[in-house]
Amino acid sequence: MISLKSALAKPFAARVKRSVLKWANNPIETQEKVFQHLISEATSTAFGKDHDFISINSHADFVKRVPVRDYEDLKPYVERVVGGEENVLWKGKPLYFAKTSGTTSGAKYIPITKESMPTHVEAARNAILLYIAETGNAKFVDGKMIFLQGSPILEEKNGVQLGRLSGIVAHYVPKYLQKNRMPSWETNCIDDWETKVEAIVEETLPENMSVISGIPSWVQMYFERINQKTGKKVGDVFKNFNLFIFGGVNYEPYRAKFESLIGRKVDSIELYPASEGFFAYQDKQKEKGMLLQLNSGIFYEFIKADEFFNSSPKRLTLKDVEVGVNYVMIISTSAGLWAYNIGDTVEFTSVKPYRVIVSGRIKHFISAFGEHVIGKEVEQALKEALANTNIQVSEFTVAPQINPSEGLPYHEWFIEFENEPNNIPQIIENIDKSLQKQNSYYLDLIKGKVLQPLVITSVKKNGFQDYMKSIGKLGGQNKIPRLSNDRNIADALTKLKLTK
């Protein structure tokens, strides 16, 4: 029998789909409206006055007056907002600060305003509704849904509430989902991640779980505990679990492991949320990429990644982007971030409509020898190398070895295998071949005998979790960089005796 809730979900989903298609089918016009709105709303702010917003009528004017900044560059303005000053980056004061841990700047305080907060909630909701509209599957709304996230406990700083983005969003779960939502508020407030996971397992085991959501690496930890506790596959414990919602990292390296833990395939929806904005979500089950959110108070610019470190790289708008090119994404938002570099690189998979994949981080690459290898390339190489094998990988990261004790330098791959393979040399050859095929600079360095083929170093079971725990970043929204241009993580893994 169909419940009232799932019956009502379908017409609601159809209505939302129509409204999404309106802006998705008019992308350039939509972005121009967003741009003009942002500029006019912020003209009288301190930032707007400093950058002569009153004279900005076009993207060209904006480029002349507003340079690309990262958090460090914007920090003087942010500190004024954090200090309690009004009308600095956006009108009035923000509703919240999303506190994130920056790699170079310590804690970062990202403003979320009355205008920007609803866009985070709406995008997450619409991702699920577009899935219902496409598949006709709405039964899951009757089951329990789990969102593995940070603590919803908020602090206060000069009259503005402060917390992790996922904790802030926890306050906005719609009423019709409150009864379905897991874990309990008390469990969600547990700070220690391992304790929290244990409590979530206890709470969810007797429930009819239909949707599970979170960053794959931390959901994997939850699934493994269920396996250990029950001796059953997750899909047998939760017979109606049929939808996995994830974001934050590429799911592909985890897919084989997840299907093994679950015991069957489940549909998935990929999201692209960040403290700075909810940028995209998967709108079609069979199309590659996520629909870029063009009507969410965010104006996008793109800089080709291989030109980003030039003295004055060209800033492109949506109409000038091409499929298959690696871009650094620059945003201006209704939270008061202006020509802001979030550090992500994206690639368009389609321009009708505009869909993207996250290809990596502009700071997370290896170019110790001029090869500029990026996250997407190492993930693809590993995927190809393990295709048609039963080898599963829990986690991995890559670092350059510039001064080996003997022989030529190389890329060192630290891999935590779920089942230790007996053909490592073949895997090395397959990964290296794929990398050479994808990256011509890497190919030239191997051929020119500047680099030797990569080396794999096995990491102990749960080694990456132990490493994250050692730096105080276990759980929540924290994730291992796929690759680094230094050996900080590599040396820490070795020092902590986490390698075999």
Image (cartoon, helix red, strand yellow):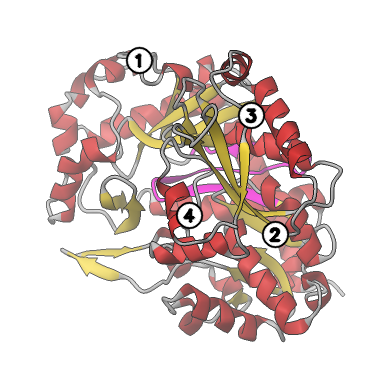
Point out residue 205 in the picture as x, y percentages from the top left corner.
70, 83
Q: In terms of depth relative to the viewer, which is nearer, 92 or 393? A: 393
- In terms of sequence position, does the residue under pointer 3 or pointer 4 come before the other? 3
Mark 4, secondary structure of its residue: helix
- Which structural element holds mark 2? strand
Q: On the picture, is 68 further left or further right than 463?
A: left
Q: Label 1: few (<14), some or many (≥20) within 10 Å?
A: few
| Numbered marks: total | 4
Q: Residue at x 41, y 59 (%)?
A: 165
Real-space Cα distance between discs 3 and 1?
30 Å
Q: Is residue 188 above or below residue 324?
A: below
Distance from the alpha carbon under mark 2 to that under mark 1: 40 Å
Quadrant for the N terminus in the image? bottom right
When the figure is inspected, residue 453 is found, relative to residue 282, above or below; the finding is above
Q: Are marks 3 and 1 in contact (CB under 8 Å)?
A: no
> Which quadrant holds residue 383?
top right
Contact between labelled residues 1 and 4, with CB atoms less than 8 Å apart: no
Tell me where the magenta segment starts and ends, as one range: 269-295
Which residue corresponds to mark 2? 244
**Relative to residue 408, is residue 52 drawn left or right?**
left
392 is higher (above) or lower (below) than 192 = above
Nearer the observer: mark 4 or 2; the answer is 4
| Residue, disc 3 | 453
- Closer to the N terminus: mark 2 or mark 1? 2
Upstream in the sequence, badge 3 or badge 1?
1
Q: Which residue is mark 4?
A: 494
Q: CA distance from mark 3 to mark 4?
A: 21 Å
Q: Residue furthest front?
A: 406
Q: Position of residue 251 (x, y in %)?
A: 66, 49
Q: Amino acid at mark 1?
A: Asn
Question: Which residue in the protein does label 1 denote?
Answer: 310
